[in-house]
Image (cartoon, rainbow, N blue to C red):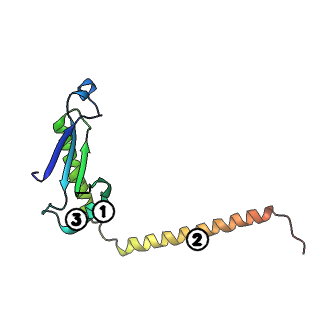
Amino acid sequence: MEKMQVSYSRSSGPGGQNVNKVNTKVDLRFNLASADWLSQELKEKVAEMYKNSITVEGFLVVRSDKTRSQQLNLADAMDKLRHMIHTAAYVPPPSSKESFERSRRRHEASVRERLRQKRVRSQVKQGRQEPQCD
């Protein structure tokens, strides 16, 4: 938590007239390079997945202005950051031989069906042409 920079500003979200008086929007800045508790591969994966949210200085910026409360917005921003890291860390399980074979058969069937539909369409268009006399 001490490696994060938190700043508050006026929100455009819910709050009525209170929105013009209270700084409820949260900007959470997290420096990926200084996070020693993340592996280098995970840092690179997070940087690649969320490259539009990273500043030139290397800070991952997370914003939240969902609610009228500063604390709830801070909790929401922390949850978003947690979700980003968990999403980048997720490794899908390897596919089994059966599922690979099933997907290969489906692909082959779809290719055959596409070619069959092309033949049918071609015959329809050929049937519309005038007969050619040689």
Question: Which residue is at the far front?
Answer: 56
- Tell me whether circle 3 and circle 1 mark residues in contact (CB < 8 Å): no
Q: Nearer the viewer, mark 2 or mark 3?
A: 3
How far is mark 2 from mark 3, CA to CA? 41 Å
Residue 58 appears at what percent x and percent y?
A: 23, 58
Residue type indicated by callout 1: Glu
Of the numbered discs 2 and 1, the one sitting upstream in the chain is 1
**According to the image, label 2 marks what residue?**
112
Residue type indicated by callout 2: Arg
Horizontally, residue 29 falls left or right of residue 122, namely left
Q: Residues within 10 Å of mark 2 (few under 14, many from 20)?
A: few
Of the numbered discs 3 and 1, the one sitting upstream in the chain is 3
Residue type indicated by callout 3: Leu
Q: Nearer the viewer, mark 2 or mark 1?
A: 1
How far is mark 2 from mark 1, CA to CA? 38 Å
Residue 62 appears at what percent x and percent y?
A: 24, 48
**According to the image, label 1 marks what residue?**
48
Q: Judge by depth and name the residue closer to the eye, 116 or 7.
A: 7
| Residue located 32% across and 55% down the image | 52
Q: Is disc 1 placed on a helix, strand or loop?
A: helix
Residue 34 appears at what percent x and percent y?
A: 14, 61
In the rendered view, tell whether residue 105 sits above or below residue 65: below
Q: Residues within 10 Å of mark 1 (few under 14, many from 20)?
A: few
Question: Residue 42's mark?
Answer: 3
| Residue located 52% across and 72% down the image | 108
Where residue 20 sits, quadrant-wise, is top left
Where residue 65 sits, quadrant-wise, is top left
Q: How many marks?
A: 3
Residue 15 appears at what percent x and percent y?
A: 26, 28
- Tell me whether circle 2 and circle 3 mark residues in contact (CB < 8 Å): no
